[in-house]
Image (cartoon, helix red, strand yellow):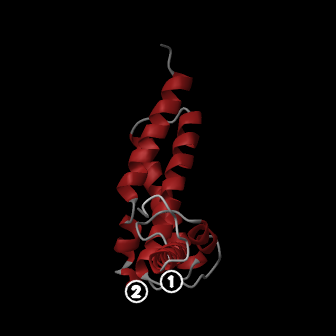
């Protein structure tokens, strides 16, 4: 009999409204916990000597910086007619060197807090290498080969 009538002031409606508002509030307060790149993380990553709340936050910043470097290096290597072993070696020299300078001189973090220098330097290295290779190969092939 009352199925077609809507009573907005019932106790059930008030509880549903409160639960929904709590869910929305908790979603707004949450940080991306899956390593996603957020504007807050990006802002903190470009700020010298930033305060990092936890180990994973800093390593996420290193990971995304490394991905960006992989794309940029792939574009540069593709525009220049760089090829072969020299291109691969230069990728690792620049990539590892810039990350070392980033955490050691720009952020001035103690690498022992993050598991030592190898833990920081290996964070995202292979995915950055894959991104670099794809970008380099596609751009080089499209600009410097005759099909």
The quadrant in which residue 45 appears is: bottom right
13 vs 55, nearest the viewer = 13
Q: Where is residue 30 in the image (x, y as percent from the top left)?
A: 49, 75
Q: Sort mark 2 into few (<14), some (14-19) or many (20+) by Cα contacts within 10 Å.
A: few
Q: Position of residue 145 (x, y in %)?
A: 50, 20
Q: Are marks 2 and 1 in contact (CB under 8 Å)?
A: yes
Q: Total of numbered circles in the picture?
A: 2
23 shown above or below 139: below
- When the figure is inspected, residue 28 is found, relative to residue 136, above or below; the finding is below
Residue 123 in which image quadrant = bottom left
Q: Which mark is residue 80?
A: none
The residue depicted at 53 percent of the width and 24 percent of the height is 142
Q: Residue at x 44, y 76 (%)?
A: 12
Looking at the picture, does residue 70 appear above or below residue 16? above
Return the residue nearer the eye: 139 or 64.
Answer: 64
Residue nearest the observer in this picture, 104 or 29: 29
Q: Position of residue 20 (x, y in %)?
A: 49, 73
Q: Which residue is drawn at 39% across and 41% down?
A: 85
- Image quadrant occupied by the N terminus: bottom left
Residue shown at 47% from the left, 63% from the top: 36
User: Distance of mark 2 from mark 1, alpha carbons?
Assistant: 8 Å
Q: Position of residue 82 (x, y in %)?
A: 51, 36
Q: Mark 1 points at which residue?
A: 109
SS at badge 2 = helix
Q: In which quarter of the image is residue 125?
A: bottom left
Q: Mark 2 points at which residue?
A: 113
Label 1, residues with CA under 10 Å away: few <14, some 14-19, many ≥20: some
Q: Find the residue positioned furthest to the top.
A: 147
Residue 146's place in the image compared with 95, above or below, is above
Q: Which residue lies furthest to the front in this view?
A: 1
* Helix, strand or loop under label 1: loop
């Amino acid at each position: 009999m009352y199925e077609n009538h809507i009573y907005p002031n019932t106790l059930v409606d008030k509880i549903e409204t409160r639960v929904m508002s709590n869910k929305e509030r908790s979603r707004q307060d949450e940080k991306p916990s899956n390593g996603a790149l957020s504007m807050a993380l990006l802002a903190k990553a470009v700020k010298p000597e930033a305060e990092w709340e936890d180990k994973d936050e800093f390593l996420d910043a290193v990971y995304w910086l490394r991905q960006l470097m992989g794309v940029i290096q792939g574009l540069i290597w593709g525009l220049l007619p760089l090829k072969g072993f020299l291109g691969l070696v230069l990728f690792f020299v620049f990539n590892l060197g810039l990350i070392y300078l980033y955490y050691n001189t720009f952020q001035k973090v103690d690498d022992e807090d993050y598991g030592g220098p190898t833990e920081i330097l290996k964070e995202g290295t292979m995915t950055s290498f894959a991104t670099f290779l794809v970008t380099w190969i596609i751009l080089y092939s499209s600009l410097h080969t005759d099909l």
